[in-house]
Amino acid sequence: MADKREFDLVLYGATGFVGKLTAQYLAKNAPTARIALAGRSLDKLKAVREDLPGPAANWDVIVADSNDQAALDAMAKRTRVVVTTVGPYARYGLAMVRACAENGTHYADLTGETLFVRDCIDQFHSVAVQTGAKIVNSCGFDSVPSDLSVYLTYLKSLQDNTGELEETTLVASLRGGVSGGTIDSARAQMEALAEDPSLRKVAGSPYSLSPDRSQEPDLGRQSDFALQRADSIDPSLRGWVTSFVMASYNTRVVRRSNALLGWAYGKNFRYREVMSVGNSLLSPVIAAGVTGGIITAFTLGALVARGPGKQLLDRVLPKPGTGPSEDARDNGWFRMQTFTKTSSGAKYLTTFAAQGDPGYKATAVMLGECGLALALDGDKISELAGVLTPGTVFGETLAERLRKARFTITVERKQ
């Protein structure tokens, strides 16, 4: 990528809830980087800039609407990287991906929308390969902890020469809130499924993000739903685990990483994610309730996403641009433990944890560091281009960045 570009990074959607948090993080942790703020409202962009410390108070602002392809193209040509928080991505994101892919500009987003990523792959992967652009979806809590944990486990197994990865389970423990933007993204996908039922097959396949489904192994049923005792996963665990609401997306990202790497993890690599609900007398009841609630949401979601149901949701759910309070963000946390068994019988535990609401405070850190890695670490990250995943692009480089940001990321051999 030409060094003559005006900016290292443009933060698009800087006036949104997570956009503001990301701007604040970049202002404090990348004071020498050439950064601009972008969005559709000049006044709101200036207001965000006024609240930023140090050199960030003089960052440029760029006005560009998500429906204005010419404006997005012009913006992409000015910068090495676009980091975007503008969602739902299926509604507002494809034009930005097009601009970056066609102009050789690297890109990072926060999407957890399977159908959007599938569209990115189908429409822009080959274009980005030709221009050298790295289009990296899911650079927040969706799906950096999942994808990077498995990739780092793979690196350790290579170092130890313990064979391919096989049974792998991520156990999530967390405290965090939900923003209106996250809910709006989920509703957008539900609406798409309601409008075109044929998309349900795409969304439901465990390999829906695979580069070539015909090359994937047949490993039998790989369900995203769970209800079991935790010690059935590993003897060190206590209590119960249940379905993890993000599993249906994260697992597909991790499987895409395996395929992009030529199935380096292994053709018998089986991956799933569950959530811990503790070890109290009520834990089994809570576990059953969570799994039942998720199944019900998937079943009925499309029915309430339109018509009278949509009007009801508009009244009771958080609005886009809203999210947890500062105290709630500070008091949140997450801990992801990934248990892996290899083909030689070796066992690994990979831990990925941080203080701060996972979907907002911690996500702003992850997104910011992914953007900075794309902009500044070209000699350290993967040479791959196209529509990619966090693990395949950033690897240990991102892990080191996040450790410096006080994340805990470790891989240990247990057997």
Image (tube, rainbow, N blue to C red):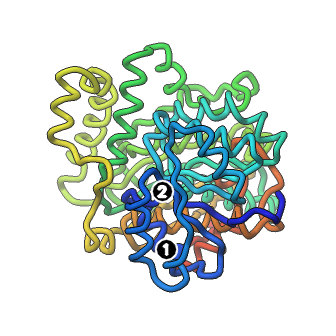
Asked whether residue 170 appears in the rendered view, the answer is no
Check contact, mark 1 vs mark 2: CB within 8 A: no
Q: Nearer the viewer, residue 188 or 14?
A: 14
The residue sitting at 62% across, 58% down in the picture is 148
| Type of the residue with mark 1 | Tyr
x and y percent of residue 181 in the render?
35, 48
| Type of the residue with mark 2 | Phe
Looking at the picture, does residue 354 appear above or below residue 277? Answer: below
Residue 285 found in image quarter: top left
Left/right placement of residue 64 relative to residue 355 reads right
Asked whether residue 308 appears in the rendered view, the answer is yes
Which residue matches tag 1? 25
The mark that comes first in sequence, 1 or 2, is: 1
Q: Nearer the viewer, residue 61 or 370?
A: 61
Q: Nearer the viewer, residue 1 or 387?
A: 1
Which disc number belongs to residue 135? Answer: none
The residue sitting at 39% across, 56% down in the picture is 16
Looking at the picture, does residue 76 appear above or below residue 294? Answer: below
x and y percent of residue 246 in the render?
43, 45
The residue sitting at 34% across, 40% down in the picture is 184
Residue 125 found in image quarter: top right
Q: CA distance from mark 1 to mark 2?
A: 16 Å
x and y percent of residue 162 in the render?
77, 57
Which residue matches tag 2? 141
Secondary structure under the numbered disc 1 in the rendered image: helix
Left/right placement of residue 186 relative to residue 374 reads left
Circle 1 residues within 10 Å: few <14, some 14–19, many ≥20: many
Q: Count up the numbered dots.
A: 2
